[in-house]
Amino acid sequence: MEESDGTHVGEITYPPKDAPTIQGMVQYILMNKKIPSTIPNHLRLSSVDKEFPRHLIPEETLCYHCPNRMVLSDPICITQKAKILTTTGIVQDISTYYKYCPQCGVLYRYQEWSEGLHNFNDHVLLDLPLCLTIRNLLQVHTAVSRIVEYLELTTGVQFPSADTVFHGYLHFEALTNHEYQYSCVTCGDHPPVVIMDLHKKASFHLSVSDLAQPPEDFNGDVDSEQFWKALTEERIARGFVSSKKAKSLQFSVPPSFHFWAPWIGRKTRRSNCVLNTEFEKIRPAKAAEVSEITVSEDRLRDELCKQKVQVIRNLCRECGLDATGSRTDLLLRLSQEMKSREAYDKVFEKIWAASGGWAVIMCPCGIVYSLKCNIRAESPRDFADMLLSWKHMPNIVIYDFARGLSTHTNLRQPQTIPFSPFEGRLMDPTAENIVKAKAGNVKVSLPWLTCKKKNPDTNGHPITGSAEHYVLYDRFHEDNTKDARDSLRKLRLVPQLAGKVNSQVVEQLFAKLKKNNYFLNMALLSTHVFLMRNIIHHYNIRKNEERLDHMKKEFQNI
C-alpha cells in the first residue's frame, strides 16, 4: 500500500479542494453508501470487547464513473492517527485510506457501515451504537455537548470537540435511509381532521432584511425534494470541508424566499412541488383580508400574558413605562399603552414577529404531517401554503386563528373556495344561528366523519367522501376573537368531534420541543432545520410504534 501525508499523490489532492470533485464524492456516497433505517441487531449493541479493523480501506476496486470500469489505484494512507469514538471510549491509531481512478481522477474513501462504523471526516469515526445513543438522547432533549461531557466523565478519555461529534452524528443521519413518511398508522396519508399551530419558541439567527427578493417570475412553487436534498448534501460535505469553506464552495443552503420549503410526506403532498409564498408577506395585504388576518390587540395581549416576567419588564422599559411592581401591574400598564400604535408595534415586534418559528400540522393522534420553518413572522399564509400543497385537503382544520386562515385561503383561490360552505363555518352566520351557537343550543352533525358517504361528493376526501371543509377553534382558543360569527366555528358544536378530539396534541408536542431550544436555537439555520425534521421523524416513529403496540394489545384482549 502506498503511504502519503494525506494531501498529495502526484496530481491527486486529498481531501479534495475543488467543488466539482467534492460534489462528485458527495453524490456517490449518497447514492451508494446509504445506511439502512433499521440497523441489524449485532451492530446496534455496544461492547467493550468489540474489535475494529485497524486499516480502513474503501471496498471499491473499479471506478463506477468510467464506462470501461477502470481499475482503481492501490490504497493510499490518509492518516495513521484516526480515532473511533464509542460509548465506552476511543480506539486510537486507526489508519484510513482512499483510492483514486487513474483515468478520471475520481476519489473513493472508506464508508462501510457494515463493519459497524461511520466515517465522518477520515480522522474521526463513530461506531454505530454511539450514533444511536446520540439519536435517543436527543429524543429526551440532551444536547450533544452534554453527551460528550458525560462520555468524557464516564470513560476518563478526552473526546474531540462537541461540535465535531455533533456534525459527525448529523453526517450519520444524512446518510441513513430515512423515508420521512410523516404519516399516522391510524389516520393514513390523508387525515380528514388536522390540528395546526406555531412553535414560536424555536428561533434562529437571521436578519430578514438581508434576504434578497425572489426572481420576478417566482410564483411560490418550490421543489421540496431538491431543497431537502440540498440540506442533506450540505451535511455530507461537512465530512470534507469546514462550514466556512462549504459556504465559499456553495455547499451551504442559506435561507431565501425562492428556495425554502416545508416538509410534507411524499404520499400526503400533491407533488414534489410545494408552496412557499412568504415573499408575499412584505407586500400590502388585500383590503378584504386586512381586518381578518391582522393580529388583533386581544390576540397579542393573550401572547403577552404567556411571556416571562423579565420579558414584560423589558418591554415596559422600551415603552417608557414603570418597570417595577408585580406581573399583573406590568401587564396592566402595557395593556393600556398598547392602545397607541407606537407601543403596539413595539410589543408586536418583540412578541409576535421576533422569529418565524415552526408551523406544524398534526393529526389528532399526535403525528406530525407537515413541518415548516418560517423565515418571517407567522401568518395564515404559512398554513395555507402547506394545506394547498396537500393532495387532499382535510375536512376539518383546527387552528387558533380560524377566521384569518379561512379568509386568506379563500381569497387565494376564489375559483374553488377551499373552505366552504359558509366560509368554513359550521352554519350560515345568520343572527338566529349565532344566538343559538352562543347559547350552546345547536349541534351540527357531520356523520361522514365516522362513516364514509355512500355517494361521495365530487372531489370528496378519500376517507370521508365529503367535499366540505371547515376551519374551527378548539375550546381553549375560541375566545381569541370578538367576531360574533366565530361562535359558529366552535369544535364542540360537532357531536362527532366534541370530547373525542384532543386538540391539545400540538401544545403537548411543543412542550417537548421547547426542551430542545437551548441547543437548537444556537445552531446555524440550515443545521437547525435539518435536525428538527430528523427529531420529528424519530418522534413520529416512536408514536406510531406506541399506537401499534396499543392496537395489538386491544386485539389480543378481544
Image (cartoon, helix red, strand yellow):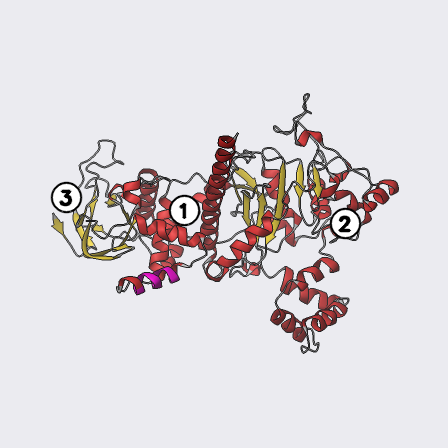
Mark positioned earlier in the residue sequence (3 or 2): 3
Q: Residues within 10 Å of mark 3 (few under 14, many from 20)?
A: some
Picture coordinates of residue 144 (x, y %)?
A: 39, 58
Residue 374 in sight here:
no
Mark positioned earlier in the residue sequence (1 or 3): 3
Residue at the image position 67 percent from the left and 77 percent from the top: 323
- The outermost residue toward the front is 557
Q: Left or right: 316 with respect to 126? A: right
**Picture quarter containing residue 229?**
top left
The mark lying in front, picked from 2 and 1, is 1
Q: Residues within 10 Å of mark 1 (few under 14, many from 20)?
A: many
Picture coordinates of residue 399 (x, y %)?
A: 67, 47
Q: Amino acid at mark 2?
A: Ala
C-alpha span from label 3 to label 2 = 70 Å
- The outermost residue toward the top is 455
The image shows residue 309, relative to residue 67, as above or below, that is below
Q: SS of the residue at dot 1?
A: helix
Rendered image: mark on residue 74: 3
Residue contact at pointers 1 and 3, CB within 8 angstroms? no
The mark lying in front, picked from 1 and 3, is 1
Picture coordinates of residue 387 (x, y %)?
A: 61, 40
The image shows residue 327, relative to residue 382, as above or below, that is below
- The outermost residue toward the left is 1
Kindly identify which residue carries mark 1: 232
Q: SS of the residue at dot 3?
A: loop
Q: Amino acid at mark 3?
A: Asp
Residue 300 in sight here:
yes
Kindly identify which residue carries mark 2: 287
Q: Which residues are magenta?
A: 145-153
Q: Residues within 10 Å of mark 2 (few under 14, many from 20)?
A: few
